[in-house]
Amino acid sequence: MKLLNLGCGGSRPKDEHWINIDNLYDLFIDKNRPERIQLESEPNYLNHDLRGGIPFEENSIDGILMSHFLEHLDIHQSVSIIKESNRVLKKGGVLRIISPDPRKFYDKTIMGDNNWGEPNYRPNITFMEYALFFYMHKQIISVDSLACMLYLGGFKEYQLSDYKQSNIPELLEL
């Protein structure tokens, strides 16, 4: 089984099934930094700018995970990555996308619930503002906007899944 973890950031499983892909060398330019040394020692980490495509053959991948990745791209880049995912996935392969849920943040805010389960790193703004408009986020992704992106990317059907549910158990690892 071959699984891709696109835009992996710091979540990089060591399991032989996974190939973790990100462009983290741009963050850790100094080759002597411990983070860069760690990345270079990981045999299943591939440093690659995914805006240039996914460097795998058609129909060669069983599953793809994009966890908190698409919101860091603009809409055109997101559709392009989804098209690329469709290209490299085997028939019956699974693309799992996880992103901040704007409806959840909105509902909690309206109910006056300020307990987000995470610290508010900027006390002068709400956690909703921080989570959805985080300085590196370029878009807010709703279920409807994601459905449109998937359709434009060549996926004709999709399934919403709850937290910790997947048709491929290895995709639940992260």
Image: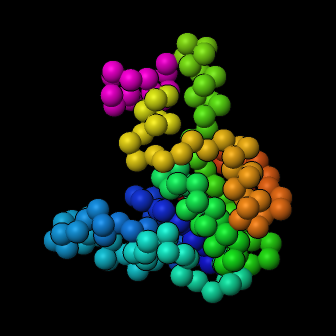
- Residue 127 occupies quadrant: top left
Queried whether the magenta region covers residue 122, the answer comes back as yes
- Residue 89 occupies quadrant: bottom right
Q: Is residue 119 above or below residue 75?
A: above
Q: Residue at x 65, y 31 (%)?
A: 103
Visual colour scheme: rainbow
Q: Position of 66 compared to 163: left or right?
A: left
Q: In front: 138, or 173?
A: 138
> Could you tell me how many numbered marks the image carries?
0
The extreme right residue here reads 157
User: Where are the magenta residues, as a range?
Assistant: 114-127
Is residue 48 visible to us here?
Answer: yes
Q: Position of residue 88 (x, y in %)?
A: 66, 78
Q: Residue at x 55, y 62 (%)?
A: 77
Q: Position of 127 compared to 106: left or right?
A: left
Queried whether the magenta region covers residue 105, the answer comes back as no
Q: Residue at x 74, y 51 (%)?
A: 147
Q: Position of residue 101 (x, y in %)?
A: 61, 38
Q: In front: 15, or 64?
A: 64
The extreme front residue here reads 76
Is residue 15 visible to us here?
Answer: no
Q: Is residue 168 above or below residue 89?
A: above
Q: Position of residue 162 (x, y in %)?
A: 72, 44
Q: Position of residue 1 (x, y in %)?
A: 66, 78
Q: In front: 70, or 12?
A: 70
